[in-house]
Image (tube, rainbow, N blue to C red):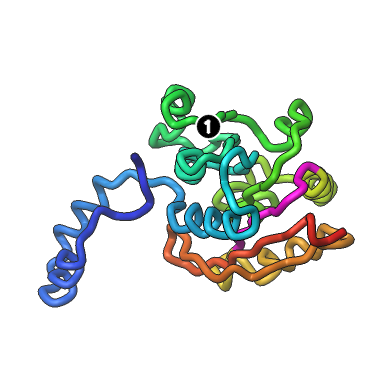
Amino acid sequence: MKTYLPELSISDLVHALTSHDWSTVTEKLGAQQYERLGLDRALAIASDLFARHGSLEGLRILDVGSNNGLVCKVLAALGCFMVGIDNGDVDGQGLYADLKNQTRATGFEFHRQDLAEFLEVDDRQWDCILLLSVTHHWETGYAMSGKRRYSDVDIRQLLLKLFQRTGGSIYYECPNNEPGFSSEFGVEFLRRYCNELPKMRMLGHTIGPNGYPRDFWALDMEWSH
């Protein structure tokens, strides 16, 4: 499984800091293959869903920007019906090459597709939708590249559709004082594009794969009516 987490031990880091010999760290980082850090998010989501529903069995969850499916795999193993979508624009390391074959064994459905295109052809309702460090890319393009950047109108329509497609919650993770992303890319992003927001709960903070902190929220649709 590819992961953002470098395969480093504490002793590797302590040795590098005390000896100033970073060769082992450099070697391991150079050999590491990366994907979105997700295990902590998956467990936080699972805990919150279990507390509110009493069970995870059969919950229908859409993971937008699922990358190689780490969150999908974890929640599917806990009984959820998972669908992951990712446009796969940045795939230099082949994260998506074998993902459809993996889904047969890990029990989730994967679509390599743009979100707007997916929502046009798939009208399913969801108990939960995951937007984990993905919406800021809608304005900037992935990794601020401008690739697949949505217009303001596109973003408003996407959020409206996602709100309409879930009767439960949307889990929303966003940058927090990350270089290149102002506060407008956090919760303010939602306020700029939505006339009305559902009840929001702050679940805490996560650390992105680049080491910068993220804010982690739940938007509860069933509590907003």
Question: From what the image shows, is residue 156 above or below residue 99?
Answer: below
Question: From what the image shows, is residue 9 above or below residue 32?
Answer: below
- Residue at the (66%, 47%) spot, across then down: 129
Q: Dividing the picture into quarters, in which one does residue 18 lie? A: bottom left
Q: Is residue 76 left or right of residue 155?
A: left
Q: Indicate the position of residue 148 as horizontal and vertical percent values.
A: 66, 40
Is the C terminus in the top left, top right, bottom left or bottom right quadrant? Answer: bottom right
Q: Nearer the viewer, residue 90 or 51?
A: 51
Q: Is residue 61 left or right of residue 163?
A: left
Instruction: Give the magenta-colored segment's residue range.
Output: 165-174
Q: Is residue 86 visible?
A: no
Q: Is residue 200 visible?
A: yes
Q: Indicate the position of residue 181 as horizontal and vertical percent values.
A: 61, 65
- Residue at the (55%, 51%) spot, across then down: 143
- Residue at the (35%, 42%) spot, across then down: 2
Query: Helix, strand or loop at disc 1?
Result: strand
Q: Indicate the position of residue 156 as horizontal and vertical percent values.
A: 83, 50
Q: Residues within 10 Å of mark 1 (few under 14, many from 20)?
A: many
